[in-house]
Amino acid sequence: MFHFVAKIELSLGWVTSKQNLTLLRGLSSSLPFGVLLQTTVKHSIVFDGVGLHSGSAARLVVEPAQAGHGIVFRRADNARDVADIPALWNLVNQSPLCTRLQNEHGVSVSTVEHIMAALMGCGVHNAVLTVDGPEVPILDGSSVSFVRGILACGLDVLEAPVWALRVLKPVDVKRGDAWARISPAEMLLIEFDISFSDAAIGTQKKRLNMSNGSFVRELSDSRTFCRKADIDHMRANGLARGGTLENAVVVDGEKVLSPGGLRHSDEAVRHKMLDALGDLALAGAPLLGHYQGSRAGHALTNDLLHALFDTPGALEWVECDTQLAAKLPGAGVHWGEIPQVA
Ligand SMILES: [Zn+2]
C-alpha cells in the first residue's frame, strides 16, 4: 500500500496529456523538485470476455479509487463485507499457471497478472477492480486490451505522492532448475530466460528497463502460450476450458498453431516478462530493482516477494521526486506506441 503524507502544500499545475502520462506537480517554490502524484482512472472501464480456466463469461470493471487505496479486486457475486481482495503479495494463493489472490474469508480471484501488469505499466496506482466471478477475463491472452482501455480513459491525479520500494540487498529463490533474483538498481529492470524443447519456443532471453514506456511498446501485446501436448492434460484437470487458439499461442514442436502466428519471434519470453511485471506489482508499490527470472513462473516470483519482505533491511520506502518519476514503469507511456494487433 502507498504511504500517506499528512499534508503537502501543492502550488503548481500538473502536466498531463494522452501522449505523456508522467504526472508531476511542483511543491512550494522553496523546494526545487516536484513529486510524482498518485493516479486513478478517470471513469469506469468495462472489459468483457471469458475466464481462461472456467470458460465462463467474465466481466472486469476498472473503477476510480482514492489516494492510498491501492489496487483492490472486488467479487460482485459475494456479500459486500467479504468481497474485497487487495492486490498484495501476501494474499497470493498458489495455483497452477496463473496468479490467484484470496482474502481471509476464502474469496478468491484468478488470473490477475495481465491486468496488474497493465496498471503498473500505465502508472495507475489506485483502482477498484470489480469482477462478476472467480476469474479476470483472458481477452486475447495479453495485456494490450487493458492498456488500450486505460489509456483511452485517461488518468486523474490525486493529492498524494507516490512512494516506491527500493531494493537494498540482493534476494534470490529457487525451485528445481528455476530461479528468480532481485538486486539493487536505479530503476525496475526485468530480465528473463526460458528454455523449451519445442523448437517454436526454444531458448529465449531478454532484458528491458521498464521505464520509457517499454512495457506498453515491447511487452503488452505478447500472449500467454502453451504446448498442444499440455492442453489435454490441463483440460483433464479442469483448467484452460476457455483457452482457444485466439487467446493463447499454442505450439506443437516447431509449429505455431494459432492463426496469424507469432506477434514477436520471442513472444514467449516477452510474455514471461509481462507476467513478472504483473506479479511484482503485487508488492503494492513500484519496485526499484533488477529482477532476473530463469525458467521462473508465478509461484517463484511470489516466493521472491515473500523473501524480499521477510529479509531485514532488503527494502526501503522512497518518495518519488521528478528524477525517480522518470524511472518508473508508467513514465514515458505514449498512446501511439500501443501495438496494433487484430
Ligand atoms: Zn500470463
Image (tube, helix red, strand yellow):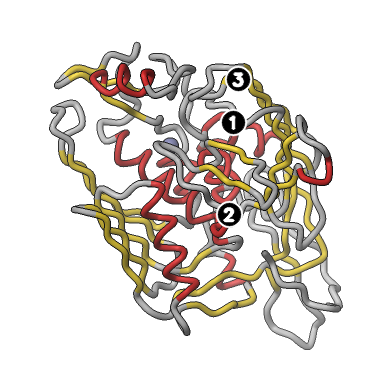
Q: Earlier in the sequence, mark 3 or mark 2?
A: 3
Q: Nearer the viewer, residue 153 or 322?
A: 153
Q: Is residue 287 left or right of residue 222?
A: right
Instruction: Give the Cα distance between marks 2 and 1.
Output: 16 Å
- In the rendered structure, which amino acid carries the disc numbered 1? Glu
**Discs 3, 2 touching: Cβ within 8 Å:** no
Q: Nearer the viewer, residue 13 or 285?
A: 285
Q: Nearer the viewer, mark 3 or mark 2?
A: 2
Instruction: Name the residue rendered at 26%, 18% in the picture.
Output: 228
Q: Nearer the viewer, residue 177 or 39?
A: 177
Numbered badge on residue 135: 1
- Tell me the crowding category of disc 2: few under 14, some 14 to 19, or many 20 or more residues within 10 angstroms, Cα based: some
> Is the residue 17 above or below the residue 327 in the image?
above
- Tell me the crowding category of disc 3: few under 14, some 14 to 19, or many 20 or more residues within 10 angstroms, Cα based: some
- The residue tagged 3 is 49
The x, y position of residue 303, in whole percent, is: 40, 59
- Tell me the crowding category of disc 1: few under 14, some 14 to 19, or many 20 or more residues within 10 angstroms, Cα based: many
Instruction: Name the residue rendered at 62%, 72% in the picture.
Output: 320
> Is the residue 70 above or below the residue 318 in the image?
above
Q: Quadrant of the N terminus?
A: bottom right
State ligand 1's quadrant: top left
Instruction: Give the Cα distance between marks 3 and 2.
Output: 25 Å
Q: Earlier in the sequence, mark 3 or mark 1?
A: 3
Q: Secondary structure at mark 3?
A: strand
Q: Earlier in the sequence, mark 2 or mark 1?
A: 2
Q: Secondary structure at mark 1?
A: loop
Q: Is mark 2 within 8 Å of ligand 1?
A: no
- Toward which corner of the image does residue 50 lie, by quadrant? top right
